[in-house]
Image (spheres, rainbow, N blue to C red):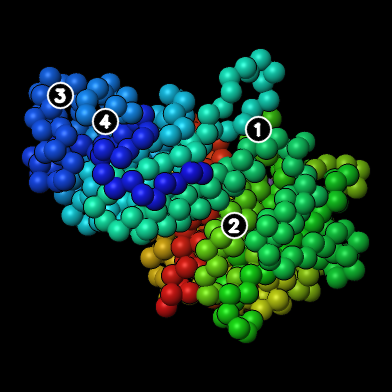
Amino acid sequence: MNIENNVKTFETVTSETLIIGIQKHHEQMKNWSLFNEFFGEKIDVWLRNGEISTDAHKITKIPYTGVNSQLKRIIFVGLGERKNSTTDDLREVFAAIGKEMSVSKLSDIAIWVESFVTDQIDEVKSAFLAGEGLHLGNYTSPNYKTSSNETDVYFDAVQFVTTANIEEVVSNFEVGKIYADAVNEARSLINLPPNMLTATDLANYAVEVATKYDFEIEVLNKAQLEEIGMGGILAVNRGSVEEPRLITIKYQGTQNWENVIGLVGKGVTYDTGGYSLKPREGMIGMKGDMGGAAGVLGAMQIIGATRPKQNVIAVIGSTDNMVSGDAMKPDDVITMYNGKTVEVLNTDAEGRLVLADATTYAKQQGANVLIDVATLTGGVIVALGNDKTGALTNNEEFFAEFMEAANETGEFVWRLPLTENDKKRIRKSDVADLNNSPGRDGHMIFGGGFVGEFAEDTPWIHLDIAGTSDASAPHVLGPKGGTGVMVRTLATLVEKRANN
Ligand code: BES
Ligand code: MN
Ligand code: ZN
């Protein structure tokens, strides 16, 4: 991306498009540098004639002819009530512009940064939200249509008209772009058809990421998993002709390997349900059952680019969940990596088996706190809908720290309880230590709670993204399909811990 860092004034804009935020109480804008000099009463007239709107997210394009001969159009975006504008609002406003750029095939814009300032958000913070929101909204998912003859236009150049320190504006925009690019990587991974993303493919992708950002990486294959006795992931993989993979990435941000955040991702590349087969309608979309893995890998890309002073380990268990003459059956008893035995009551409750082994491995490799991320249960969708991530935890303090990060990124997370009675039901079996499916009543809690049995006393947060990982329709921050949820929150948590 071409970012010119010398454009401070309206006259020096060489882009054909200028972006301006316009608020209900636009008379405040008249105190701002650009307004009087170049627009004077013009905005008043446009507003009075209803040619531009101040409604939040509303976009209006106005052709421009005037003192700057390069400039061809102004894109106004409504900010609504400026006083109430939050970081979430501004991120969405910029995403709306990003979407408009992709629709109108604009690759090159100038932003009048001052017009996006609110009571709480200065020009520098606005620039971060611009970098993030514009690139989130600009994302389109690749498709495989042979008839498509449209050439994609990528957003690749930006200029800033700003009264703030231009270097700070540019660097904040760049960090915002790093965040969005990582989310978009996760989205594309989720959107890949399952015949194009096997566990082996996912591991190869992780190796590419590790090479790019100079991470230490280990990929264990089936023979190696058998050798160390990872009975959970192997049981899920039994019915498949594709090999499983356990992917471990280490980022060492401090001198010693201590105070390590462990990120554990569910990387089920396709979930048929196994012998507890899903109904045909319920199977569609199960290519996205690696959304947790995508979230963790996305966060690692932000960490790789921003290099926080914080140690992080990512562990991803990857396999598909298939049927064959050899597949795991209900009634099977399996032995997990940590030695605990599990009675399999439902082969469709496979994610917890994969996560449990990955969690044990993360602990062994030195994780002092754990966050697992998974498209784990339909139950979370019943409980919270498609726009909230469900959480469980065994540690109030760690959860409060996590929620600060989630509030900053605007990713909605809601905690559900995990009681002693719930744990009793997970531990109830005549033949084994645990069972993998205690019932359908409140079953989000049983899914996450099962993983908690393997986190043991280590501070742990479970994030069930079954509702939030895949959007069934376009939304403010992006199109239908993979959302890349939790990428930004996980990276923000790591960054916050590094700065504390
Ligand atoms: N991958 C599914 C959960 C899921 C459902 C993700 C819908 C995305 C959208 C998971 O492996 C699963 O099958 N869960 C079962 C658990 C049940 C058998 C206890 C479920 O939610 O029905
Ligand atoms: Mn399943
Ligand atoms: Zn699944």
The mark that comes first in sequence, 1 or 2, is 1
Q: CA distance from mark 4 to mark 1?
A: 53 Å
Question: Residue 101, position in %: x, y?
Answer: 42, 30
Q: Is residue 174 left or right of residue 230?
A: left
Q: Amino acid at mark 4?
A: Asn
Element marked by disc 1: loop
Query: Which mark identifies residue 284?
Result: 1
Q: Residues within 10 Å of mark 3 (few under 14, many from 20)?
A: few
Displayed quadrant of residue 396 = bottom left
The image's mark for residue 301 is: 2
Residue with the most extreme top position? 147
Instruction: Give residue 368's quadrant in the image.
Output: bottom right
Q: Is residue 360 left or right of residue 327?
A: left
Q: Which numbered disc, 4 or 1, marks the residue that appears first in the sequence?
A: 4
Disc 1 crowd, CA 10 A, few/some/many (<14, 14-19, 20+):
few
The residue under label 4 is 68
User: 495 above or below 93?
Assistant: below
2 or 3: tag closer to the N-terminus: 3
Q: Nearer the viewer, mark 3 or mark 1?
A: 3
- How far apart marks 1 and 2 lie (CA) works out to 29 Å
Q: Which kind of residue does numbered mark 3 sit on?
A: Trp
- Kind of element beneath mark 3: helix
Question: In front of the other: label 3 or label 4?
Answer: 4
Which three-letter amino acid code belongs to the residue tagged 1? Ile
On the image, which quarter does residue 66 sit in?
top left
Distance CA(mark 3)–CA(mark 1): 48 Å
Q: Are marks 4 and 1 in contact (CB under 8 Å)?
A: no
Task: Tell me the tag on residue 46.
Answer: 3
> Could you tell me how many numbered marks the image carries?
4
